[in-house]
Amino acid sequence: MAAPVLRPLSTGEVLDVSFGLYRALFIPLLTVALASRAIPAIMGIYLQAIGGFAVHLRLGLLQFFIGIFLSAIGTAATTYIVSGAYLGTDVSANDALRAALGLLGRLLLLSLMTSLVVGVGFLLVIVPGFILLAGLALSTAVLVLESPISPNDAMNRSWQLTKGSRWKVLLTFFVAVLFLLVPMMAIGAIGAVGSVVGLWSDMVTIVLISVLQIFIYPFVYIVITVLYYDMRVRKEGFDLEILARATQRA
């Protein structure tokens, strides 16, 4: 595919570029999504079928931790694939997953650190929580694309990159998450009605939502990666850097 245009993007343009990348990279992105989300989804469906988390605590905890591990790998692998489009290279799902595995320890530590910081921000006062969420939103992309780098340095780097643009980052991230939540809520509402009138069971709703998540979650990670490059274009002239490299190769 042609590399995305490297210029400052508005919120709408970030989302439009993200949709374009999702369509162009659908097969490798879906492969990564299946590799990272199918097992937790199947375990979650099975768990609900046999009584739920409260009844089967050990299985529920196992599913939770497997989900965290595989989600970290899926996020990093998706970031690698999308970044390849910006750099003019095709990154296969297998290569992306292998590279992501090498970062697993740091990815998990970063996830824990950012969750704690943002969580404390929301517990103390709501507004600082949103500011911290926006300021640290690019931490995973930084860790993946600027490796080797520590989780703490990745958080600091994200904070600097988003400085002056955090409300834009927050708005874009919020809209991206809505693309995930709205269809899930719609299926949940339809499922509730369907259960009442006897058209289908609650398990059908759970299965449909689980399948939907596999298809939609990659879009959120794409948006974060596009935001990362947008911030670099704005603050560091990343487009000029790529142009200079292309000129040198020519």
Image (tube, rainbow, N blue to C red):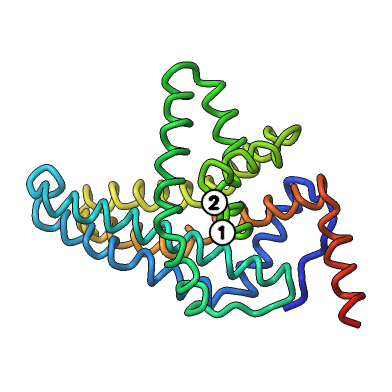
Name the image quarter holding the N terminus.
Answer: bottom right
Q: In this orientation, which residue lies closer to the viewer: 191 or 8?
A: 8
Res 24 → quadrant = bottom right
Q: SS of the residue at dot 1?
A: helix
x and y percentages locating residue 141 in the rendered image? 59, 54
x and y percentages locating residue 71 in the rendered image? 40, 58
Of the residues shown, which amino acid type is indicated by label 2?
Thr
Residue at x 45% of width, y 53% of height: 107
Which residue, given by chain and number where applicable, does mark 1 sit on? 144
Res 219 → quadrant = bottom right
**CB-based contact (under 8 Å), mark 2 and mark 1:** yes
x and y percentages locating residue 11 in the rendered image? 73, 45
Which residue, given by chain and number where applicable, does mark 2 sit on? 140
The answer to whether 245 is drawn above or below residue 206 in the figure is below
x and y percentages locating residue 136 in the rendered image? 57, 39
Residue at x 34% of width, y 49% of height: 188
Residue at x 19% of width, y 49% of height: 61
Q: Is residue 119 left or right of residue 60?
A: right
Q: In this view, does 223 lie to the left or right of 129?
A: right
Numbered mark located on residue 89 in the image: none
Name the image quarter holding the C terminus.
Answer: bottom right
Res 67 → quadrant = bottom left
Q: In this view, does 99 lie to the left or right of 236?
A: left
Outermost residue toward the top in this view: 125
Q: In this orientation, which residue lies closer to the viewer: 5 or 237?
A: 237
Q: SS of the residue at dot 2?
A: helix
Q: How crowded is mark 2: few (under 14 residues within 10 Å), some or many (20 or more)?
A: many
Q: Residues within 10 Å of mark 1 (few under 14, many from 20)?
A: many
Residue at x 74% of width, y 47% of height: 231
Of the residues shown, which amino acid type is indicated by label 1?
Val
Mark pair 2, 1: CA separation? 6 Å
Outermost residue toward the bottom in this view: 250
